[in-house]
Image (cartoon, rainbow, N blue to C red):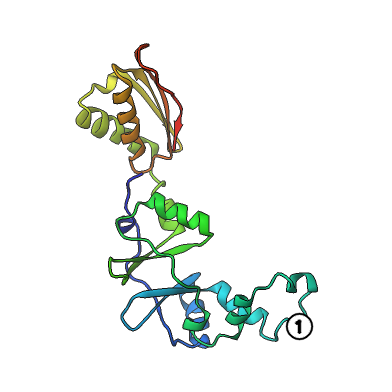
Amino acid sequence: MNTAVKDVMTSRVIWMEQDTPYAAIAAAFEQYRVSAFPVLDQAGQVIGVVSEADLLAKEALADGQAGIPGAVTGLLHRKQQEKADALTAGEMMTHPAVTVRPDDTVEHAARMMYTLQVKRLPVVDAGGHLIGIVSRSDVLAVFDRPDSEILAEITDDVILHEFLIDPAMFVVTIRDGVVTIRGNLESANLGHQLVAKIRSVRGVVAVRDELTYPPAERSVAGLYF
């Protein structure tokens, strides 16, 4: 999918300065109902992220490790205890911040969120300055598109107008964003280009390539995510 982060991100972002005190951070979480805030330095560059988990460490370990079972205590890391002792956003934040650029694909952002197990990512420009934030819900919204609308774009915009092929040559079906395409093509290369283009249509989850190619050309049909 070629949808860019800039197309789905939120541009109005609440952020914290390095010296924002703990009480103000806790109040902001309560007020804005978000899971994390970017932390900026004096130049406006993103240097870290402070999350609810960071605040939880302070609450959980406020009295050191007293009252925590020994088995659990053994799993606590020094950085967690440092967060518990922190008084400001700069001391408490996770750094360096993991960010994305506005022209990165939504697919790339989704992969980072999944791999790092985070709910949102700051979006920065070439200079590292904050310009937005993208969340899991922003990413998932890209796939919230009616199948009929996706099918119309595939047949009219992609097959007919971009590839200049009669859509009647194919049987294209779609269910829950998964596209299946059948038909005969004169070359495997053309088929691969068509499947790749369909895969980039907004809302397409995967493409099942069930095209028939000339016997002389070998092609591996399959499911493309």
Identify the residue shown where x is 39% and y is 37%: 147
Q: Quadrant of the C terminus?
A: top left
Q: How crowded is mark 1: few (under 14 residues within 10 Å), some or many (20 or more)?
A: few
- The residue to which callout 1 is attached is 66
Q: In the image, is 48 to the left or to the right of 187?
A: right
Image coords of residue 100 (percent x, y): 37, 61
Image coords of residue 170 (percent x, y): 33, 21
Identify the residue shown where x is 49% and y is 88%: 21
Q: Find residue 138 and report its image quarter.
A: bottom left
Which SS class for mark 1?
A: loop
Viewer-proximal residue among 152 and 51: 51
Identify the residue shown where x is 31% and y is 18%: 185
Image coords of residue 44 (percent x, y): 32, 78
Q: In the image, is 124 to the left or to the right of 50?
A: left
Q: In which quarter of the image is the N terminus?
A: top left
Identify the residue shown where x is 57% and y is 72%: 53
| Depicted 143 relative to depicted 169: above or below | below
Q: Which amino acid does label 1 sit on?
A: Ala
| Depicted 187 relative to depicted 204: above or below | above
Q: In the image, is 163 to the left or to the right of 147?
A: left
Viewer-proximal residue among 34 and 196: 196
| Depicted 149 relative to depicted 12: above or below | above
